[in-house]
Image (tube, helix red, strand yellow):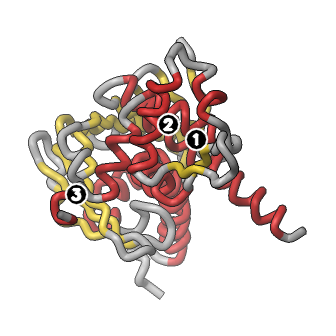
Amino acid sequence: MAIQQLGNERTTAYADGADLVMERIFDAPRDLVWRVMNDPERVTHWWGPKGYTTTVEEMDVRPGGRWRWINHTTGGEDAPFRGEYLEVDPPVRSVRTFIFDVPGFDDRAAVESMVLEDLGGRTKVTARTRFPSAEDLEGALAMGMIGGALDSYDRLADEIAKG
Amino acid sequence: MDMQRPDPLSLTFAALADPTRRAILARLAGGEATVKELAEPFDMTQPAISKHLRVLERAGLIEQGRQAQWRPRRLRAGPLRDVADWVGQYRRHWEASFDRLDDYLRELQEEGEHGDDGDDR
């Protein structure tokens, strides 16, 4: 199976069929990582890209509990996400549905599982997200890559414009 | 009339919902091309490709050059970037969030060294 390497130098990311897998090692004990990832107040300190703010509208971390988080982008737009917790096993594993809550996307749920592995004072987090189909994931990645190509194209154009 | 037109983002998504059209865009991301050139990699007639091009054009994803008869198509970056931003958001979101989580965990632990509750000075 073709595995596509993505990600930056700190996070390992790869596509595996309909799964997007991201791995990252944090220099903190597992209990703390779990708390910070599952506490509604603390989520607002790290969820989303730099500069974005987050509102946790709902977050009931237990099986059947709902969550809805809203990212306020630097461009002044709101990007809402929601879903339901399916499995919660602190401090090791949680599974939840993940829906990008905007028309056109809100009819398809990805299933996101987080596994926290104790490395003795450090913690490996593996986020595995199963998209509704491999095509969805491929579509998303293809568009992301086109986006990247566009940026390079833009930079090239700027460079040429300088003469 | 205007009120019945789908919003630009929906048009863009509809245009991108087809693998041939995505491949055309990927090709145009490398530079402008004529209809003939665009049709080459596909097992399709030029009229079929032209139909795809019209969909992309309506969505504002591509435009036609003014040069002579062969009128090369080129990419218009704006709408596509919007979509890439929305769809690609998921992965970038987690990468960026992990970066921030890393910083935040460090902060919390440094606070912990000065006093267990963080507000103990």
Q: Label 2 amino acid? A: Leu
Q: Is residue A97 left or right of residue B118?
A: left
Q: Indicate which disc residue A145 carries.
A: 1
User: Answer yes or no: do the residues labelled 3 and 1 have beta carbons within 8 Å?
Assistant: no
Please rate how many residues cluster around mark 2, counting C-alpha atoms within 10 Å: few if below 14, some from 14 to 19, many from 20. many
Q: Residue at x 69, y 41 (%)?
A: B30
Q: Nearer the viewer, residue A98 or B79?
A: B79
Task: Give the Cα distance between marks 3 and 1.
Answer: 29 Å
Give yes or no for contact between labels 2 and 1 (Cβ–Cβ under 8 Å). yes
Left or right: residue A89 versus residue B76 is left
Q: Which residue is mark 3?
A: B5
Say which element carries label 1.
Answer: helix
Q: Which residue is mark 2?
A: A141
Sort mark 1 into few (<14), some (14-19) or many (20+) by Cα contacts within 10 Å: some
State whether residue A53 is above or below residue A155. Answer: below
Picture disc at residue A28: none
Residue nearest the viewer, comparing A19 with B54:
B54
